[in-house]
Image (cartoon, helix red, strand yellow):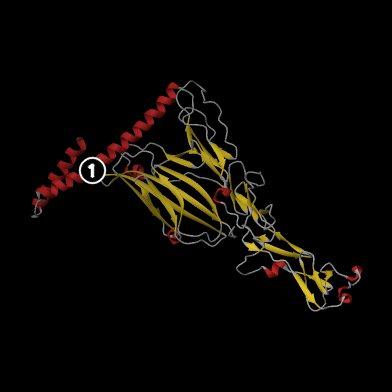
């Protein structure tokens, strides 16, 4: 009320000043419009102040009701997952994440309540069954693995999903004397050359080779090694190996780049989780983020903004401290800044939803989602999926290796006046490989 009276006095003074300068006094409609704008601004400030006051009172109430050194029971991270947050005092939160290849079932966030019990349900990390979609073709058997699957192919088929037919090589020779089937001494043959196996039936000699060899030329007594890597390097049948094929006498083997292991089928590559297996060199104040083919050590810092201060409430989240009543610059600063890290393969197909931002509860009448900065717009855009949720959308593939950052802003409005801002910083680590 005091602010409204002050606004009226200022408008009347402005009118008197305009008359003294031989200028027209603002019309009644203009003054009413100005008063409405001042009322909106004061209402937004009041709502922001009351929100901060409610939050502060809630925290003070929890602190006063809690016994000295009182904490909630220790809570463990789920198997194949991580727990973020070490403080178990009333009012504090812990967050849970699952390793790659697992999905979280249960509460993602749990809070220590005043009665020293945890909110929500204990989460579990459930293995994602990649075999549920029946990816193996041509009679292949699918075996589910952590963050992947392996196809055991029937005889005569190969490839990551048994999509490639592997031919057998033989030759039939008609009206040839049995002397043509004689073999050279075994000692003179190199590993890439082996004698053929011939049999004579009704005057016709049939010669075959061991797997991985074929008869070349007119000499049916000699089988030469097949270079499977060259034979299946390109074409509709697909490559034998996901990464590198090494030809060997009578066969081949597949190799993977550093940071990957060869899968059980011998053809595909599986990422090594250096963070889960502790094969990293991150310090205690860093977070280990597993990427395809490696890992990243990251530090999360709270923002430094003039007239506003922040406190880290979890390893990935910073929240703004309550603002002074008369500090408009502080009230316009983000209420919270969250950090999230994603690992993807190179040239991942687009469009694709990368991340979602949702509001748990809304005080204002409008939520607005936007993408900050111009650099991220080359690959991303933000679109609304429902009233309370916005999603970060990949619009063009990213060639790796690369690190791309995007900031998603969620703004809460009441009659077009800002009540709160929430920033989500998403860092995407792109592998140099497409697997």
Image position of 213 with respect to 401: above or below:
below
On screen, residue 51 versus residue 222, left or right, reads left
Describe residue 377's horizontal placement relative to residue 73 as left or right: left
Give the labeled residue for mark 1.
40
- In the foreground, 256 or 267: 267
Q: Nearer the viewer, residue 135 or 314?
A: 135
Between residues 306 and 423, which one lies in front from this camera angle?
Answer: 423
Residue 115, x across and y down, in percent: 46, 22
How many numbered markers are drawn? 1
Quadrant housing the N terminus: top left
Considering the numbered disc 1 on the image, is that residue within a helix, a strand or a loop? helix
**Category of crowding for the residue at label 1, using alpha-carbon neighbours closer than 10 angstroms: few (below 14), some (14–19), many (at least 20):** some
Residue found farthest to the front? 202
Which residue is pictured at 83% across the width and 78% down the height? 176
Q: Nearer the viewer, residue 412 or 345?
A: 345
Percent position of residue 63, x then y: 44, 25
Which residue shows up at 70% across the image and 56% down it?
266
Q: Position of residue 217 (x, y in %)?
A: 79, 78
Name the image quarter holding the C terminus.
bottom right
Residue 66 in view: yes
**Image coords of residue 429 (percent x, y):** 54, 54
Is residue 305 among what the camera can see? no
Q: Is residue 57 above or below residue 326?
A: above
């Amino acid at each position: 009320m005091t602010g409204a009276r002050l606004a009226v006095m200022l408008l009347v003074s402005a009118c008197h000043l305009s008359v003294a300068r031989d200028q027209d006094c603002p019309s009644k409609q203009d003054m009413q419009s100005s008063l409405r704008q001042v009322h909106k601004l004061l209402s937004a400030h009041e709502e922001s102040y009351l929100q901060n006051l409610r939050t502060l009172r809630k925290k003070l109430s929890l602190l006063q009701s809690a016994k000295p050194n009182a904490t909630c029971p220790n809570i463990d991270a789920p198997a194949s997952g991580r727990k973020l947050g070490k403080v178990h005092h009333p009012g504090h939160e812990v967050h849970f994440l699952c390793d790659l290849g697992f999905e979280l079932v249960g509460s993602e966030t749990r809070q220590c309540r005043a009665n020293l019990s945890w909110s929500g349900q204990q989460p579990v990390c459930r293995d994602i069954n990649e075999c549920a979609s029946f990816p193996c073709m041509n009679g292949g058997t699918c075996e589910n693995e952590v963050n992947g699957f392996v196809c055991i192919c029937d005889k005569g088929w190969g490839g990551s999903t048994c999509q490639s037919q592997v031919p057998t090589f033989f030759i039939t020779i008609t009206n040839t004397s049995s002397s043509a089937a004689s073999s050279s001494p075994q000692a003179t043959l190199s590993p890439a050359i082996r004698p053929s196996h011939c049999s004579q039936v009704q005057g016709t000699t049939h010669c075959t080779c061991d797997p991985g060899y074929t008869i070349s030329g007119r000499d049916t007594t000699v089988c030469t090694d097949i270079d499977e890597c060259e034979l299946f390097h390109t074409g509709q049948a697909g490559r034998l190996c996901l990464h590198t094929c090494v030809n060997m006498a009578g066969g081949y083997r597949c190799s993977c780049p550093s940071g990957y292991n060869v899968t059980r089928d011998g053809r595909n590559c599986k990422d090594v989780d250096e963070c889960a297996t502790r094969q990293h060199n991150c310090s205690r104040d860093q977070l280990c983020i597993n990427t395809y083919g490696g890992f990243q050590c990251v530090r999360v810092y709270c923002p430094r903004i003039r007239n506003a201060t922040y406190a880290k409430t979890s390893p990935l989240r910073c929240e703004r401290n309550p603002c002074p009543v008369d500090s408009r610059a502080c009230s316009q600063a983000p209420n919270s800044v969250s950090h999230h890290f994603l690992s993807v393969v190179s040239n991942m197909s687009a469009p694709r939803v990368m991340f979602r931002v949702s509001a748990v509860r809304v005080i204002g009448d409008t939520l607005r989602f936007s993408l900050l900065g111009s650099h991220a717009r080359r690959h991303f855009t933000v679109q609304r999926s429902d009233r309370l949720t916005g999603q970060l959308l990949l619009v063009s593939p990213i060639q790796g290796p690369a690190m791309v950052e995007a900031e998603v802003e969620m703004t809460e409005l009441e009659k077009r006046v800002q009540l709160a801002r929430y920033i989500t910083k998403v860092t995407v680590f792109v592998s140099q490989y497409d697997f």
